[in-house]
Image (spheres, helix red, strand yellow):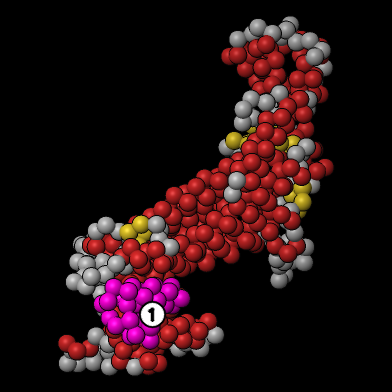
Amino acid sequence: MKLWGGRFTKPTNELVELYTASIPFDQRLAAQDIRGSLAHVQMLGACGIIPQADAETIAAGLLQVQKKLEQGELQFSIAHEDVHMNVEKHLIDLIGPVGGKLHTGRSRNDQVALDMHLYLKEEVEEIVGVLYRLVEVLTDKAEEYLDVIIPGYTHLQRAQPVLLAHHLLAYVGMFRRDIERYEDAYKRIDMMPLGSGALAGTTFPIDRDLVAQELGFSRLYENSMDAVSDRDFILEFLAASSILMMHLSRFCEELVLWSSTEFSFIELDDAYCTGSSIMPQKKNPDVAELVRGKTGRVYGNLIGLLTVLKGLPLAYNKDLQEDKEGMFDTVDTLKTGLVLFAGMIETLQVRRANVERAVKADFSNATDLADYLVRKGLPFRNAHEVIGKLVLQCIEQGCYLLDLTLEQYQAASELFEADLFAALDIRNVVNARNSKGGTGTESVKIQLAHVREWLGTK
């Protein structure tokens, strides 16, 4: 017998029952559903909407249901459709018909919205905590390799040399913004919809503020129709998660490249790699590749929910049942991926000798040679042309700028003097860039100090 079956004369078609049931996935909200119900029944008793003795009986029954859930003994049935009806059925089985009073003054519409707000509050706090850990790991790694210079790229072509620490701190900047996005989205997650009923509120003299205080919400939805139909808070979570995954994916692309034989800049720890079933020599960066690959499913979860919502009239529609699986999947993808990613970064080793050879085997110091001529009084555009011709000369001769003689330089411009070779030294090239945010060692030390200071306030 359905808990809502009084109006119906026929049983639900079995296929309809399977198709419309959400319990296979929304049972994940059982803990939140019980928590919300405990706060709700406490309010019902306090406001005299149901007898206080009934409220206490229901609360005691809910705690028994909660204990069964924690011990893995709570069984869920498709016949009861969703997590709310399953919990209520268990409650009634335990304490009898008085359990039916629990649903006084609420609807499954505001109940499910409450459960998801409670769920995302918990999960976002945990995700932000792991992100702080990742920022700390990256900062430690940047300090460990503060002296290492790597090629910097634009268009995936050698551009200018940079400190590896500077490169890593660029991702720290991205992940800090991700944290800020989650913290801002949390403001909308931290809103309580319960008490809105199906869409129009309730005739009972409920105290929504009391429930919000009990559940730790900072504010209420002011409009009942908005409260039961709003899924913006999930969209914001999915959007912030998509941007985070994009940042992780970009980083993973570089890790895959850097660990290849062609680059050989880093060695990923064996614990975060796998081998080949046929090629004994292989060491594949599977964690990095999978984080990169799973970015698409998080994007898909965002686009999927946006598509569900785009044509819905107010207030609640069954379409909104499609809001949960993508949310759960994104949470699972992020929590596991972030922990693995932090471990992968923490254990990677830089191949210093390979990196040092790499930064000497290119023309990434060419801009500094042009700046040298500018400081001697030559307009930059003219200096650019002079150095461009010298680079071409080196390419034709199979050498690099540091291999040319002073005489060859002076043949290109009379402004060149012996101090040009100091300007070409890679470490001098890097340390000359101490403008705010630059890759010079002193600038990077300041950036590191700022991150440490930021971490210390969290």
Q: Is residue 248 left or right of residue 58?
A: right
- Identify the residue at horizontal 50%, vertical 63% (top origin): 123
Name the chief secondary structure element in magenta. helix
Q: Is residue 55 inside the magenta stretch?
A: yes
Query: Residues in magenta?
Result: 30-57
Q: Quadrant of residue 208?
A: bottom left
Give percent across and percent down for residue 28: 45, 75
Q: Which residue is mark 1?
A: 83
Residue 102 visible? The answer is yes
Give percent across and percent down for residue 124: 49, 59
Give percent across and percent down for residue 340: 64, 61
Dot 1 falls on a residue whose secondary structure is: helix
Nearer-the-camera pick, 184 or 206: 206
* 83 to 308, vertically: above or below: below
Q: Is residue 6 left or right of residue 209?
A: left
- Identify the residue at horizontal 48%, vertical 55% (top origin): 241
The amino acid at mark 1 is Val
Nearer-the-camera pick, 162 or 380: 162
